[in-house]
Image (cartoon, rainbow, N blue to C red):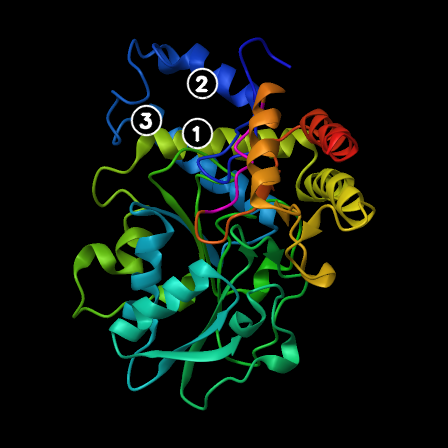
């Protein structure tokens, strides 16, 4: 481990690739021999334009998408997308249909509900969000404008392992916590958005990947900055963009390409997750996983111990071992290890070894 660095299992803001952090540090005072930092140069400059367009190109390449898709950078994180989606697409008497699989999909639904255009297509709330609803559970309304899903649930540790079939209804996904973590048929989605602070960069920017045809005619009766085609028409440069965040996301995308792309990321992430789930499953119920096995996340491993006192002790002892950020979300308690792309195998192995030791001693 790097000197003065801990293994950071926080769910977001989260650990970032050390290589990218060092490269950013090296370039921070004098970007591209401009004599200025990336946070000081004009977003209209040729130096920044190169950064912006390269980030877009690398993201589309990683996702296997063609010219019929666009990459947008929007401020406000995923929470702003919760409101923008129904504002742009739940029109002419149609309703946004939502699968409720955790906290963030519920928040997205509530934003549509505020606008009077939300409908629930499926939910796992009654099961304490321990599972992802199956395809057979999803009931689309006759007036469905789109189906919205949250692909990975950081709080509950569940993740989709299939892409819902929606016939001709557009599919929209919040992929904030598993974006670019594995290959998918991204062409099946009309729009994907991600607050980048979990798996791709610093807080302050939402990455949106969208079919160009889907946003050609954004409604003109909503504010300019809430129309998707405002960003598409102006290459996300209608106003001053979150330049540093975009620069960093571009660095992370280039790093993923250098690792071998999404298939390599998926292999590494599955291997890391298996380390922890194997210990949970073989602990004689000392560790109890929250998610049902067929819905388990490769990004966020959530579990409980026999008592809250033991959980507090686990967190304190883990911190002594430089294993940080393992406390579960305040709404559900327990423990959570977020093992995003940038978390090295060695970090997860250290946590796994600690879990075995802690059970033996307690």
Q: Are marks 1 and 3 in contact (CB under 8 Å)?
A: no
Q: CA distance from mark 1 to mark 3?
A: 17 Å
Q: Quadrant of the C terminus?
A: top right
Q: Are marks 2 and 1 in contact (CB under 8 Å)?
A: yes
Q: Is residue 252 left or right of residue 265?
A: left
The answer to whether residue 260 is above or below residue 92 is: above
Residue 331, percent from left and from top = 44, 53
Residue marked by disc 2: 24
Q: Are marks 2 and 3 in contact (CB under 8 Å)?
A: no
Image point (56%, 44%), residue name: 308
Image point (80%, 45%), residue name: 283
Q: Indicate whether residue 328 is drawn in magenta.
A: yes
The answer to whether residue 268 is above or below residue 125 is: above
Q: Which of 98/30 is in front?
A: 98
Label 2 Cα crowd, 10 Å radius (few <14 / some 14-19 / many 20+): some
Q: Secondary structure at mark 3?
A: helix
Residue 12, percent from left and from top = 46, 39
Q: Is residue 315 visible?
A: yes
Q: Is residue 87 left or right of residue 320?
A: left
Image point (53%, 66%), residue name: 101
| Range shown magenta | 323-329
Image point (78%, 42%), residue name: 279
Q: Which of 238/311 is in front?
A: 311
Q: Indicate whether residue 261 is drawn in magenta.
A: no
Residue marked by disc 3: 46
Q: Earlier in the sequence, mark 2 or mark 1?
A: 2
Residue 248 has which mark? 1
Residue 186 has which mark? none
Quadrant of the rendered image containing residue 312: top right
Label 1 Cα crowd, 10 Å radius (few <14 / some 14-19 / many 20+): many
Q: Quadrant of the N terminus?
A: top right
Q: Earlier in the sequence, mark 1 or mark 3?
A: 3
């Amino acid at each position: 481990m790097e000197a003065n660095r801990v293994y950071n299992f926080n769910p977001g803001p989260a650990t970032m690739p050390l290589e990218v952090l060092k490269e950013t540090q090296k370039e921070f005072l004098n970007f591209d021999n401009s004599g200025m930092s990336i946070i000081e140069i004009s977003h209209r400059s040729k130096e920044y334009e190169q950064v912006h367009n390269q980030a877009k190109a690398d993201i589309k390449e990683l996702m296997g998408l063609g010219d019929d898709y666009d990459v947008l950078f929007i401020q406000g994180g995923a929470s702003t997308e919760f409101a923008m989606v129904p504002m742009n697409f739940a029109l002419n008497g149609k309703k946004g249909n939502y699968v409720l699989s955790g906290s963030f999909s519920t928040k997205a639904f509530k934003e549509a509900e505020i606008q009077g255009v939300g409908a629930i297509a499926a939910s796992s709330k009654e099961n304490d969000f321990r599972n992802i609803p199956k395809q057979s559970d999803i009931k689309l309304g006759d007036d469905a404008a789109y189906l919205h899903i949250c692909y990975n649930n950081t709080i509950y540790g569940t993740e989709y392992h299939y892409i819902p079939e929606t016939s001709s209804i557009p599919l929209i996904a919040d992929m904030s916590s598993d974006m670019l973590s594995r290959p998918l048929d991204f062409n099946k989605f009309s729009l994907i958005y991600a607050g980048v602070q979990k798996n791709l960069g610093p807080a302050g920017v939402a990455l949106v990947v969208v079919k160009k045809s889907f946003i050609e005619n954004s409604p003109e009766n909503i504010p300019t900055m809430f129309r998707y085609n405002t960003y598409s028409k102006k290459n996300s440069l209608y106003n001053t963009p979150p330049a540093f965040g975009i620069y960093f996301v571009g660095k992370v995308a280039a790093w993923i390409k250098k690792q071998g792309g999404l298939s390599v990321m998926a292999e590494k992430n599955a291997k890391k997750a298996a380390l922890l789930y194997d210990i949970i499953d073989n602990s004689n119920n000392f560790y109890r996983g929250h998610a049902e096995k067929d819905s388990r996340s490769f990004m966020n491993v959530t579990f409980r111990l026999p008592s809250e006192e033991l959980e507090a002790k686990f967190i304190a002892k883990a911190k002594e071992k430089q294993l940080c950020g393992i406390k579960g979300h305040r709404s559900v308690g327990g423990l959570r290890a977020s093992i995003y792309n940038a978390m090295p195998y060695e970090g997860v192995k250290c946590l796994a070894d600690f879990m075995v030791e802690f059970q033996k001693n307690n």
